[in-house]
Each structure stands twice: as structure tokens, then as C-alpha cells.
Amino acid sequence: MPPVLVLALLAVAADPAPPAPSWTVSVDPLTAALGFAHVQVERVLAPRWSVYAGPSLRLYDSLLGEPSGPFRGLGAEVGVRGFFTGAAPEGAWVMARGVLAHLSRTDGRDDTAVGGYTSALVGYTWVGPTGLVLSGGGGASWFAYEVGGVGIAGPLPALHTAAGWAF
């Protein structure tokens, strides 16, 4: 066998596995269907912990019927995940998240407000060999997301779906 080929094979065999991803970027298709556009940028902090942040934009009425009404919300979402299986960003987790947004009416009224919601969820994130991220979970939310008599208020179920990329 030629020496160059032997050296190449030894280099490939000695190459350690690539490092586990420490970032993810994902979108939530269920939330998008409900009228909210979210992009989550997640960073691993420790083997069992990650945080994420991103914009939270309520731009249009839900494709599923509710929530609807003449209002818009422009804000941010932050969350923290604790992983009890696997290692962040993959495995089973518990999550707390919060959203804070500036709300305004879109029907010509001048009403504005600050609104938001918070959620607690349990779920699972899978990271494929190519970096594909699929995630889902469920829990409970509390909404105070109203302006001028329209919006969302009180307790509601919380669902999380996400598709994205890990790197």
C-alpha cells in the first residue's frame, strides 16, 4: 500500500468524533399556525442545561381559528431547559419560558399595552446525525396578552414543536 494512503487511513482512523453541537436554531410550526412567528436560538451552557432566546411576533390571525382579533404583538421569548436524559441539546427536558411583547390594535384604534405569557413544559429533542433537530413537548401556560379588549388571557395548555438545525 502506498505510504500516502496509509497515512491518510491512519489520520481518518485517529480523527475523534466531531464535538457535540452546542447551538441550535429552530422554528415552531405549531406556533406559526397559531399566528406567532418564533425563531429560537439555543446555546448549551452545561451538559444538562441550555438557554434560548429569539423574537416572538404575533403578526396574523391563527390558521386554526383562535387566537384571532385585530391585534399585533412584537416581543421576545427566552427560555431555559434542564435535560434529565442525554446531554443538551438532545434528550428529555423540562423547560420554563417567558414572552414579553408590545401589543397594539390593527383596526385603527390607538390602544397599546405590554403583554406576555409564561409556560412550563416537558418534552424531548432529537438531534440527527446531519444536525436536523426535531422537538416536541407539552405543559401549561398563563397568558396576559391583551390590548383594548382583544387578545389572550388566563391559563391555557402549552405545546411546543420545533424543527431546525444543530451545530
Image (cartoon, grey):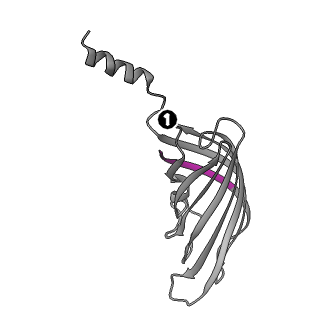
- Left or right of 143 on screen, residue 165: left
* Residue type pointed to by label 1: Gly
Left or right of 10, for residue 102: right
Q: Residue at x 62, y 43 (%)?
A: 88
Residue 132 picture location, percent across and down: 47, 40
Q: Residue furthest front?
A: 3
Residue 69 shows in the view: yes
For the record, the magenta segment spans 158-167
Given residues 20 and 164, the one toward you in this image is 20
In the image, taking residue 27 as reference, residue 88 lies left or right, namely: right
Task: Return the residue at label 1.
Answer: 128
State the quadrant of the N terminus: top left
Residue in the picture at 55% in, 57% down: 31
- Tell me where residue 93 sits by quadrant: top right
Q: Nearer the viewer, residue 55 or 112?
A: 55
Neighbor class of circle 1 (other Cα within 10 Å; few <14, some 14-19, many 20+) is few
Kindly report the secondary structure that dominates the magenta region of the rendered protein: strand
Image position, residue 57 (x, y; %)? 53, 68
- Labels in figure, total: 1
Q: Is residue 131 above or below residue 64?
A: above
Quarter residue 153 falls in: bottom right
Under tag 1, what secondary structure? loop
Identify the residue at horizontal 38%, vertical 19% (top origin).
10
